[in-house]
Image (cartoon, grey):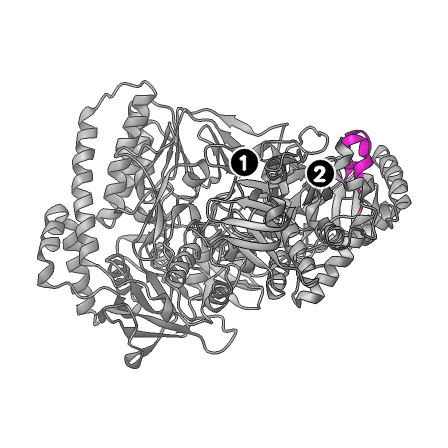
Amino acid sequence: MRLEHPSVRRDGALIEITYDGERIPALAGETVAAALAAHGVAAYRHTRDGGRRGLYCGMGACFECLVTVDGKASQRACLTKVAEGQVVRSQPPAGTAADPLAPLVPPPQGAAPEERTPDLLVLGAGPAGLAAAEAAARRGADVVVLDERPQSGGQYFKPLAPSHRADRPTDRQFRAGRALVDAARLAGATIVQEATVWGAHAPDEVVAVVAGRETVYRPRRLVIASGAYERPAPFAGWTLPGVMTTGAGQTLARAYRVAPGRRVVIAGNGPLNLQLACELVEGGVTVAAVLESAPRPSPAQWRALWTAVRSAPSLIGDGARYLLRLRRAGVPVLWSHGIVAAEGAAEGTERLERVRYAPLGADGAPRLGESVTVAADALCLGYGFIPSTEIARALGCAHRLVDRHLGYLATETAEDGATSLPGVFAVGDGVDLGGSKVAQARGTLAGIAAATQLGFADTDPEQGRRARTDLRRAEGFQAALWSIYQAPPPRLDAVPDEAMLCRCEEVTFGQVRAEIAAGHDSLAALKRNTRLGMGRCQGRYCSATAALLLEQATGRPRAADQYLAPRLPAKPTPAGAFAFEKPEWGGHQRAITPNLARPLEDGPLPDQEAEILIVGGGVVGACLAYYLTQAGRDVLVVERGDTNLQASGANAGSLHVQLLSFDFGAKAEAGGGPAAATLALGPRSIALWRDLERACGADFELAVTGGLMVADSPAGMDFLRAKAALERRYGVENAIIDAAELRRLAPALSEELVGAEYAPQEGKINPLRATYAVLEQARRQGARFLRGVNVTGIAAAPAVEGGGWRVETPRCRIRAKQIINASGPWARETGRLVGIDVPVHSAPLQMIVTEPAPKLVSQLVAHADRHLSLKQAVTGGLIIGGAWTAVFDPARRFNTVSRSSIEGNLWVARHVLPQIAGLHVVRAWAAMNINIDGAPIIGPVPGLPGFFNTVTSNGYTLAPVVARMTADLLLDGRTDIDPTPFLLDRFR
């Protein structure tokens, strides 16, 4: 349904697109979402469980409105403009030769991305970003503004799209937005629309995709004005097509003159909902009800009302007019009411049909006995906002927790937007919530401050004084408005188990509650156990809810450093834009091994005793605990962070049998001998993984699919033949195959490949499932686990005390007869406590994962000449790695990804699997790998009776076998595999 307005006319040419084969009329200049909504279409992408999703956020943050456009997968309908003859599909391409994933962007040109060096880079063209750009450019700075939307103005101004024209702005909001855009351009700022910011690796290294190409900006100063997104308000049915945010509904109505539905319910908290209701009514839409969760304003709030009137009389006047118009139109405005459920006709329905709502008690609980059900084909939800702090957090700017509504992280800034990082400013609702007037005033102050730091004269001091006056007035108004619209607290306990918590990964409240009850009581543990926060929206619409749910369930207050770690890209970005060839190197690049733990618990514990103490709660520690408790031993595992959260929990899950390319030949550690000695361990360990899966009664997503190490040259094939011959001597099954056989096994791989080594015993496993399952089974067998326990001292106990070991930690003392050092990359640190050197180095590595794709490759894929590990997960995402180096940030005690490694890794991956160019990168993460000499270190330590080491590179594959061997050596003094090549003695 298209909305009419006497001052607005359609200006775009009438064109035609098709959607799932149906011909749809559209207006040039509007988005796919607007065209579909005008035609009454609400259902877009298909979920893994067969459901449908529709337009939700309307601003490109939720990734629910994905469609395939002319063969390009995962295009956001809310941002993608229509074109004549466009073919739009709700399903992604099949990834076959007949229906391939079309490249999302042109192939990169040159040896490196283009670099630009403005004085000031502004991220976001909303009120704050435009004001900052105008102020700095007016003072002479070279200013570039990057904005993701088709038009400048942000969520607040929402300018009219090119599909329509108005001879003059139809209201004060449109007029103010146009004036600010014009002022920024007139001052000399360059505004780049439809630019997707990958993220910031440093204040002077901001990466974006502009016109389909990676562009690196190296500004002298940076202003982050990334805005906010509407906070989620979960209930049963909130993922149904037709349920969207108020912002999405208003974008359709204001920018594209399209109604979100014919009969609409609007619910939430704040006057924005009243504005949308009026705009829809004026356009001929039936608004069934406006539900406001706050109580009706009363005379007792006269101070706040007076402050609001005095600070912004025009805005208060607007609110009064909205209420009057709605009353005249017969639209009920129900205070202290909220949504109970959204319902469709039946399971699998493709559209909302009914809305159930109820009055709210003072505590926020719905009075279900008084609930009402009304017919509706659209439900718009506006419950407030959450700042988009992703880029500021990735840079390392200081943040604090704001305990309002669901709670959110706010960037700590000075009045002029200066953050804790020199040269970085953050302003607007992307910092903390304050509304457009606060955003614009702070943006002006940030632009002036940045220009002043750059040495430009303040040619208009009065502008800064006006901005400070405006800021004080706007902050007073906002505080008064929040007081007037003070809503009861969110009642997550009233949300039913079947309601979705994580929209992207389809994780329900019931699943999350069960995990918390099982002891997985941190956001990081929930993420690893349920995939919460791993989808395309990257936790925007679930992490705040899950954090509050955790606090309510555990009584442990939320803390800023316990939120999900920021990951790049800030939003899914075309993989093909970042593929640049890099020089090769040998092995792993070593680094320091910092303490990365962020313990949840730090209070004192009772002193502990155990027969066997295992230091380290990763996959090796879990397997050790399993085998030793299976033998009836008393086992205590201590972990200074939380179990499975460091090297093991960030593992990509490859099960290797053949040697990696850098473990053989000229690149190999120690000439390759130690790595060759481990060859016999791989098949044994994978067999043990199968045994563990059966014993635990859990699905590890373990699949022995075979591995392919591919070559693209005769020299590469010669390398593979020599390597395969060595591997066969150690009992590894393999075969050298030609290009035709490679094509038969993996038809999606590049036609430039000339052959491969095929190792049928290789495969993959989900480390997020497997480690936790083994930990739980060990716990059922009697193992005890203590987290947040950092071992700081180990000393031999005297014989008169029965021998064994005394262990010191900040939380308790521990007595143990035997100790196993299973500290992974930190094994050297643990060894030093008993006076030995365990020659283990850390190697920060990074991995990349794409969005879910059609089935492209079954095998584990590597390359003969280049660093590459590639496989497709059960969820469909491609996991791309291969020992590309990450970077340690000492200021944050945090490993982070390297742009150079991202580019090089994606170049190799695209070279091997060309259809990667048709996918988006969803996230990249850094992990801590272990570097020894190519072989594990296991067994007893001479001169230290009762002290054992168990640490290995290629740790996920080999964890069960090295744990089994250590357990055998500890229990029986022998093992059926000769441990000699793996003992610490070999380094003497």
Tell me the quarter of the image containing the C terminus: top right
Return the x and y of residue 697 as percentages of the image width and height.
66, 68
* Type of the residue with mark 1: Pro
Nearer the observer, 762 or 33: 762
In the image, the segment drawn in magenta is 658-675
Q: Quadrant of residue 125?
A: top left
* Type of the residue with mark 2: Gly
Return the x and y of residue 804 as percentages of the image width and height.
63, 48
Pair 2/1: label in front: 2
What label sits on residue 748 in the rendered view? Answer: none
Residue occupied by mark 2: 943
Q: Are marks 2 and 1 in contact (CB under 8 Å)?
A: no
Classified by dominant secondary structure, the portion drawn in magenta counts as helix
Return the x and y of residue 875 as percentages of the image width and height.
62, 58
Does 61 sit left or right of 228 as displayed?
A: right
Question: Residue at point 23% right, 43% down?
Answer: 437
Assign a secondary structure to mark 1: loop
Query: Is residue 672 rendered magenta in the image?
Result: yes
* Classed neighbour count for the residue bearing mark 1: other residues with Cα under 10 Å, few (<14), some (14–19), many (≥20): some
Residue occupied by mark 1: 594
Nearer the observer, 538 or 241: 538
Assign a secondary structure to mark 2: loop
Does 707 sit left or right of 395 as displayed?
A: right
Return the x and y of residue 922 as percentages of the image width and height.
55, 48
* Classed neighbour count for the residue bearing mark 2: other residues with Cα under 10 Å, few (<14), some (14–19), many (≥20): few
